Amino acid sequence: MGDRLFPTLGNGGYDVVHYGLTLDYVPETNRLKGTAVITARATQDLSRFDLDLSGLRVRTATVQGAKAQVARRDDEVLVTPAKAVGNGDVFKTVVTYDGIPRTLKGDDGGLEGWIETDDGSTALGEPTGSMTWFPGNHHPSDKATYDMTVTVPKDEDGDPYDVVSNGRLITEKDKGETVTRHWRTDEPMASYLAHVSVGYFEIHKGWTDDDLPVYVAIDPDESDAAADVPDVLPRIVDWASERFGPYPFSSTGAVVDHLPGLDYALETQTKPYFDEAPDEALIVHELAHQWFGNSVTPRRWKDMWLSEGLATYAEWLWEEGHGGRSTDEIFEDFYDGTDDESKGIWAFPPADPPSAGRVSDPPVYGRGAMVMHKVRNAVGDKTFFGILRTWTREHRYGNADTRQFIALCEEKSGKDLTGLFGTWLFGERKPPRM
Ligand code: TRP
Ligand code: ZN
């Protein structure tokens, strides 16, 4: 894919349409056995292609039903089909694999990939972790739909584990010794948002005012602290829908896990993942990502400020609308450094992280939100929220980049915003007070 920040992620030559993942997982041994059925369209003639996979053993691979040659190099699976795939062909690759999936320690120091919890496991994919549990084209620009069918044995008392993943629950089967859950993601998803959690959960089902199904899974260790999440979450979805445009997916919810030491949440598609009971601002942040990041996904990692800046700005808007500081006051607190989250926001321009380890650093979040506030002040509320709704409508389920965002702001407002973006987004240092 040639991403400057993550040069080895993703592969050229094809575009994945759908992943069908069938997984068997044993929590006691942390052993995973998988079959990935990858449906893709070739974007050039392919005598060979690569998939990203870190660790695990590949047992077999077929392309269009015929046995393919497989080699491994670093975090790549090199697949040579028996017969070359033609440009434009839709082709099916089936990979069987197994092993103990890896937990990765990211360049930013955080844990990702397949992580064992005290009662099972969780899989978190930002920025690179999804390659630890399924082979694929692991770059945000290649989005696909998913079916995930996961089988887990019952525990030693004969009690079933829950399996929670993105999208809608299609079937649940209890075969006595094991349970199988099939989850489906109907709308395209970037692979860093793919998620599965195994463990014990209390399940809260409900509906939003707009009749969207809600599925909240809460680890019993967090049930007191997270008691209001099932009520608060649908209200936030409705609040955000009024501002950002129609909710983009066919279901919503959350996974509130208990994973001390993880220290972050992730906007996993349709059901954001929380390592512990979240406060309201964090729920707002992760739900805002469903529009900004998940439905409209950054084209490259350096465009991530569009997701994080808007998700952070959603927190500001929520605070302003719920008895907290005004967004002008929050902006000032970031500018003068009194807000805790303003630490480090001037280290680099938000759309240009200097290295992969810094894609989740403060400039991408706090200064990204400041850029949004500056745009809002320059163009007015009506135009600003019109820009956000046009953005989520025009790029729904796709990818978009910084240049396109700037162009849309200028087009909708009829203003030349070169100076504003030059100072606040691209400027190397904190601008003086004007
Ligand atoms: N996207 C997450 C959020 O804002 C934060 C995060 C977790 C992250 N891991 C990351 C951001 C890795 C960039 C890279 O809620
Ligand atoms: Zn975020």
Image (spheres, grey):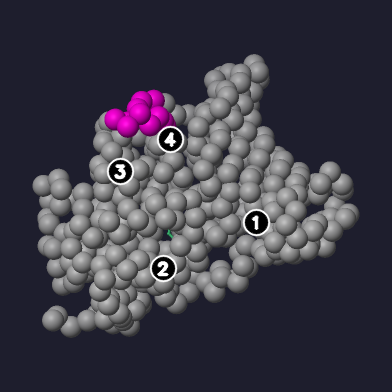
* Disc with the residue nearer the chain's start (3 vs 1): 1
Mark 2, residue position: 404
Residue bounds of the magenta highlight: 204-220
* Disc with the residue nearer the chain's start (3 vs 4): 3
Mark 4, residue position: 251
- Residue type at mark 2: give it: Gln
Q: Is residue 24 magenta?
A: no
Q: Mark 3 and mark 2 in contact (Cβ < 8 Å)?
A: no
Q: Mark 3 to mark 1: distance in Å?
A: 30 Å
* Disc with the residue nearer the chain's start (1 vs 2): 1
* Circle 1 SS class: strand
- Residue type at mark 1: give it: Asp
* Circle 3 SS class: helix
- Please give the label number shown on residue 241: 3
* Residue 306, position as x, y percentages in the image: 38, 63
- Residue type at mark 4: give it: Ser
Q: Mark 4 and mark 2 in contact (Cβ < 8 Å)?
A: no
**On-image quarter of the N terminus:** bottom right
Q: Mark 3 to mark 4: distance in Å?
A: 13 Å
Q: Mark 2 to mark 3: distance in Å?
A: 22 Å
Q: Residue at x 18, y 58 (%)?
A: 381
Q: Mark 2 to mark 4: distance in Å?
A: 28 Å
**On-image quarter of the C terminus:** bottom left
Local crowd size for mark 2, using a 10 Å CA cut-off: few (<14), some (14–19), many (≥20): few
Q: Residue at x 64, y 44 (%)?
A: 19
- Residue type at mark 3: give it: Ser
* Residue 269, position as x, y percentages in the image: 46, 45
Image depth: mark 1 or mark 2 in front: 2
